[in-house]
C-alpha cells in the first residue's frame, strides 16, 4: 500500500471548538495516523499519514470541522521522502 504524509495548517475558528478531538476521532475512524496540535497564532497544525483514499476522506472532514468550528482554509503540503516523520501507528493530540 502506498502511504503518503501531509503537513496541514488549518485556519479559521479552529481552537476552543473541539477541533483536535474531532481530528483524532476522524483519523481513528479512517485508519489515518499522525498528530494534531494548536499553534500560538490560532491555527491548528497536523501531520497525517495514510493511503490516498483515506487522506482524501480525512481532508474532506477537516474542511468541515466540528459543528462549532468555522474552517476558513486548509493548507496542505505533501511531505517528500526525507521530510516525513516516523509515526508510531496511532493518532495523537499534542499539547
Image (tube, rainbow, N blue to C red):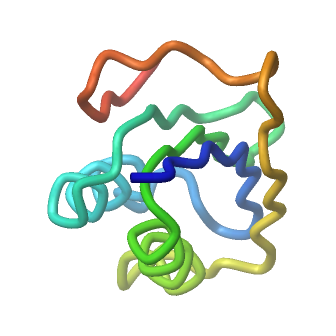
Camera-nearest residue between 42 and 51: 51
Residue 40 screen position, x and y as percent: 76, 28
Q: Residue at x 69, y 24 (%)?
A: 84
Camera-nearest residue between 38 and 28: 28
Residue 90 screen position, x and y as percent: 24, 30
In the rendered structure, the answer to whether residue 30 lies left or right of residue 6 reads left
Q: In the picture, residue 83 is in which quadrant?
A: top right
- Please give the count of numbered marks on the rendered protein: 0
In the rendered structure, the answer to whether residue 32 lies left or right of residue 84 reads left
Indicate whether 10 appears above or below 67: above
Residue 86 screen position, x and y as percent: 51, 13
- Toward the front, the furthest residue is 1
Q: Residue at x 39, y 69 (%)?
A: 54
Q: Residue at x 31, y 16 (%)?
A: 88
- Toward the left, the furthest residue is 29
Residue 3 screen position, x and y as percent: 50, 48
Indicate whether 73 appears above or below 60: above
Q: Residue at x 71, y 50 (%)?
A: 8
Amino acid at each position: 500500500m502506498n502511504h503518503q504524509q501531509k503537513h496541514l495548517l488549518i485556519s479559521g475558528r479552529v481552537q476552543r471548538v473541539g477541533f483536535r478531538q474531532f481530528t483524532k476521532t476522524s483519523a481513528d475512524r479512517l485508519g489515518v495516523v499522525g498528530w494534531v496540535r494548536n499553534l500560538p497564532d490560532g491555527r491548528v497544525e497536523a501531520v497525517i499519514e495514510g493511503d490516498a483514499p483515506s487522506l482524501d476522506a480525512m481532508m474532506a472532514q477537516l474542511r468541515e470541522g466540528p459543528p462549532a468550528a468555522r474552517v476558513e482554509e486548509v493548507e496542505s503540503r505533501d511531505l517528500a521522502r526525507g521530510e516525513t516523520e516516523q509515526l508510531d501507528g496511532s493518532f495523537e493530540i499534542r499539547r
